[in-house]
Amino acid sequence: MTKGSNEAKVVTAGVLFERRRLLICQRPPRDHLAGLWELPGGKVEPNETNEECLARELLEELGIEAIIGAPLATSEYMYDGGAIRLVAYRVISYAAKITPYFHSDTRFVSATEIDGFTFAPADLPPIAKIKYNWSPPVTAGCQHTPESLTGPS
């Protein structure tokens, strides 16, 4: 997206479950949207696919190497700094302990706990779709998102 362009900047987000709990992250103080919760991810760089972006962002922000699956949901939102198009992807599996290098907090939340958190506006449609379809399978050594989420909305 060029400066002054009306084109939305593409941002990716990871939908990562562990033991039927969804990973959410809190934006740090003094940051845009400070204190709000979001799905982990970030902006797509030039010459980078969405999946490459999400894998890079998860490594940079959380210290995990992830296998990225299919897109699950999309959202467009106009922030003061411009429009973004958020694309949320399944995180099929990940390796390493989650260590928040960017966020002030990370949590795995259940379907009954998620409504107690205030999310960034662009994350609300993907979160709503995840909540509607919340039924992640229990797996050993590999984390999955709800199988009922089949593609972008």
Image (cartoon, helix red, strand yellow):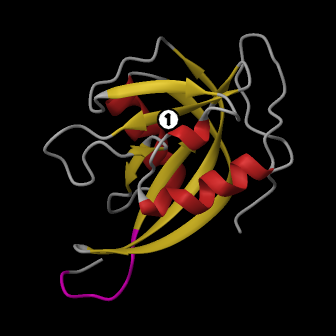
Q: Residues within 10 Å of mark 1 (few under 14, many from 20)?
A: many
Above or below — where is 107 with respect to 6? above
Q: How many marks?
A: 1
Query: Where does residue 136 sit, x and y in percent of width and height?
Result: 80, 32
Q: Nearer the viewer, residue 76 or 108?
A: 108
In the rendered image, the quadrant that contains the C terminus is: bottom right
| Magenta-colored span | 3-9
Above or below — where is 1 with respect to 133? below
User: Residue sitting at 34 percent across and 23 percent down?
Assistant: 100
Dot 1 amino acid type:
Ile
Query: Residue under circle 1?
Result: 24
In the rendered image, the quadrant that contains the N terminus is: bottom left
User: Residue sitting at 46 percent across and 22 percent down?
Assistant: 64
Q: Residue 150: tell me if it is visible.
A: yes
Residue 69 within the segment the image draws in magenta: no
Q: 123 left or right of 36?
A: right
Chief SS of the magenta region: loop
Above or below — where is 103 with respect to 38? above
Q: Nearer the viewer, residue 94 or 149?
A: 149
